[in-house]
């Protein structure tokens, strides 16, 4: 346990502080720069410009109090597998954070992987992330961070080749047949030819199919790939505050 006591002051202004418990119920803790590794924080933590890294490669941090993170501060989450709090980092706190996620130990996320990295009460949330930096994925995969501000989860989605209605990884006459059979029909899905997910098969979907004609999953470029079925969100804004924790 690290504590500044009632008359003490700790200034973290560079370097790394590793501790099991950081007790801030007394004294003053100034986090100006540097990196903090801890499993528990007792009291309020004000991250002015440093990096909070839960646990110790990888691990869980629980803040028993309020968390204030300023615009220049960062929460760093490591992904080394799919076991929560053991192979990937977890932050148990209410609030808004600047998020930096790193893949460690050569780990490569796969389609269908889910990482429950944040615990908070949605009703106590104000603002949003100023940045979400995620590791690069292999071809055909994409990150879904649309639930980050509601469930605290990150997911890895497999990508579909735009125009590949029958899912055989190539855009050809068979897919054109599917689109033609459903042309001008409403309440359609990707498999019916609704490649832009607007609920109707129309000329816009025909344009996507034409742009990717003869392309394959192996050779298709990024513009030919679309996530299935979730629309990814861009999270923006800045300085944020947090409150009560939801669970331990």
Image: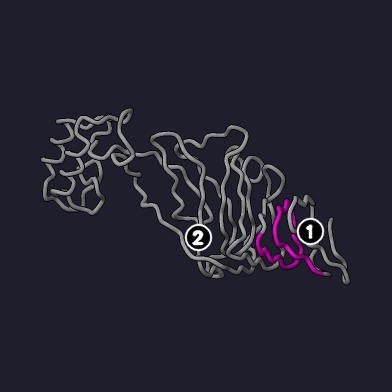
Q: Which residue is mark 2?
A: 149
Coloring applied to the structure: one colour
| Kind of element beneath mark 2 | loop
Question: In the picture, residue 243 is in which quadrant?
Answer: bottom right
Query: Is 96 a magenta residue?
Result: no
Would you say 185 lies left or right of 149 here?
left
Residue at the image point whose x is 24% and y is 34% from the top: 166
Quarter occupied by the C terminus:
bottom right
Residue at the image point whose x is 25% and y is 30% from the top: 170
- Kindly give the residue lying farthest to the front in the view shown: 14
Q: Is residue 173 above or below residue 247?
A: above
Which dot marks residue 22? 1
| Location of residue 61 in the rendering, given as x and y in whole percent from the top left corner | 69, 54
Q: Earlier in the sequence, mark 2 or mark 1?
A: 1
Which dot marks residue 31? none
| Kind of element beneath mark 1 | strand
Query: Is 34 a magenta residue?
Result: yes
Q: Main secondary structure of the magenta part?
A: strand
Residue at the image point whose x is 63% and y is 40% from the top: 87
Quarter occupied by the N terminus:
bottom right
Residue at the image point whose x is 59% and y is 62% from the top: 120
Count the numbered circles shown.
2
| Location of residue 18 in the rendering, given as x and y in whole percent from the top left corner | 78, 50
Q: Residues within 10 Å of mark 2 (few under 14, many from 20)?
A: many
Give the extent of the magenta segment.
28-49
The one of 134 and 159 positioned closer to us in this rendering: 134
Q: Residues within 10 Å of mark 1 (few under 14, many from 20)?
A: many
Q: CA distance from mark 2 to mark 1?
A: 26 Å
| Location of residue 72 in the rendering, given as x and y in whole percent from the top left corner | 60, 61
| Location of residue 66 in the rendering, given as x and y in whole percent from the top left corner | 67, 68
């Amino acid at each position: 346990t690290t504590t500044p006591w009632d008359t003490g002051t700790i200034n973290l202004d560079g370097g790394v502080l590793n501790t099991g418990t950081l007790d801030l119920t007394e004294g003053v803790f100034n986090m100006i720069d540097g990196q903090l590794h801890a499993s528990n924080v007792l009291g309020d933590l004000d991250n002015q410009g440093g990096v909070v890294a839960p646990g110790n490669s990888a691990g869980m941090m629980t803040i028993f109090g309020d968390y204030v993170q300023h615009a220049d501060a960062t929460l760093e989450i490591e992904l080394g597998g799919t076991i929560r709090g053991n192979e990937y980092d977890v932050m148990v706190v209410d609030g808004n954070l600047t998020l930096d996620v790193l893949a460690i130990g050569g780990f490569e996320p796969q389609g269908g992987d889910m990482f429950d990295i944040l615990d908070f009460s949605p009703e106590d949330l104000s603002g949003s992330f100023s940045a979400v930096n995620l590791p690069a994925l292999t071809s055909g995969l994409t990150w879904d961070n649309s639930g980050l501000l509601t469930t605290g989860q990150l997911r890895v989605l497999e990508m579909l080749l735009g125009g590949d209605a029958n899912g055989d990884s190539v855009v050809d006459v068979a897919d054109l047949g599917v689109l033609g059979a459903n042309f001008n029909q409403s309440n359609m899905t990707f498999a019916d030819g609704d490649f832009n997910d607007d609920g109707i098969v129309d000329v816009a979907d025909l344009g996507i199919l034409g742009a990717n004609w003869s392309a394959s999953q192996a050779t298709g470029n990024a513009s030919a790939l679309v996530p299935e079925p979730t629309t990814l969100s861009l999270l923006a804004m800045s300085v944020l505050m947090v409150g009560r924790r939801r669970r331990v």
